[in-house]
Image (cartoon, grey):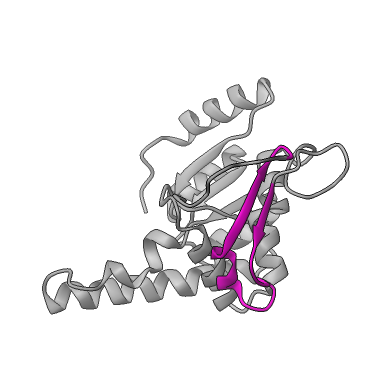
Amino acid sequence: MQSLMTKEEIQAAVETAHCVGKKVAAHCYGGVGLKHCVEAGVDTIEHGIYMDDDDIEMMLKAKAWLTVTQNGYLSDQRIINRGTPELTKGFVKFRDDVRAAYTKAVHSGLRYALGTDGNHGGFAYELETLVGFNIEPMKALQAATTEAACMCGVDEKVGSLEAEKFADILVVDGDPLTTMSDITKVTAVFKGGRRMDDISQW
């Protein structure tokens, strides 16, 4: 895949951000764009749906992160009632290719966190899909919490329940470690130790 920015432009952005202590994330699918981003020192690759073995190996060596965003690419809603049989067939192949790429990536040793690509309300789907890639439920939850916080460089404040950290807590009726879909059965939300009222509209 081609890159919309030159390697020099990406390098300049990374150097400028890193000079002021900021991390850099790149909207990137794979190919030349990913290669340029990793070589330039980008901290995290968002999406990476077309990553191949070489891309994964390069990211591993650079200790770059991947933000896995499955919702917009793997949901069956993308291929239901979407036009011609040929178009549906294309969506099915695309979905299967993305699933294969993500499965390989999350089992490669690559550090990753979960994202949604702006599909608000779809985080439970991300978790369930990750478990479907034969990832242990606890590791999936960590990708959404501790690993995500570490990737963003805010793990000293959030990401886990520890002394001196913000008490951001999701209370559910069930056990996501047994049935990940229980993550949707929210009974209470605490933000910074304060219970958020009226979650009925969530």
Q: Is residue 173 magenta?
A: yes
Location of residue 133 in the rendering, given as x and y in whole percent from the top left corner: 57, 76
Q: Is residue 123 above or below residue 199?
A: below
Q: Is residue 80 left or right of residue 177?
A: left
- Residue in the foreground of this view, choosing between 188 and 15: 188
- Visible residue check, residue 104: no
- Visible residue check, residue 156: yes
Kindly indicate the quadrant of the structure image that contains residue 4.
Answer: top left
Q: Is residue 161 above or below residue 15?
A: below
Q: Which residues are magenta?
A: 169-193
Location of residue 63 in the rendering, given as x and y in whole percent from the top left corner: 70, 50
**x 73%, y 47%: residue:** 159
Location of residue 3 in the rendering, given as x and y in whole percent from the top left corner: 38, 44
Q: Is residue 141 left or right of residue 79?
A: right
Farthest residue to the left: give it.
84
**x 58%, y 30%: residue:** 14
- Residue in the foreground of this view, choosing between 104 and 174: 174
Q: Is residue 127 left or right of residue 84?
A: right
Q: Is residue 9 above or below residue 88?
A: above
**x 62%, y 79%: residue:** 134
Location of residue 45 in the rendering, given as x and y in whole percent from the top left corner: 54, 48
- Residue in the foreground of this view, choosing between 117 and 179: 179
Kindly indicate the quadrant of the structure image that contains residue 165.
Answer: top right
Image quarter of the N terminus: bottom left
Q: Is residue 52 above or below residue 152?
A: below
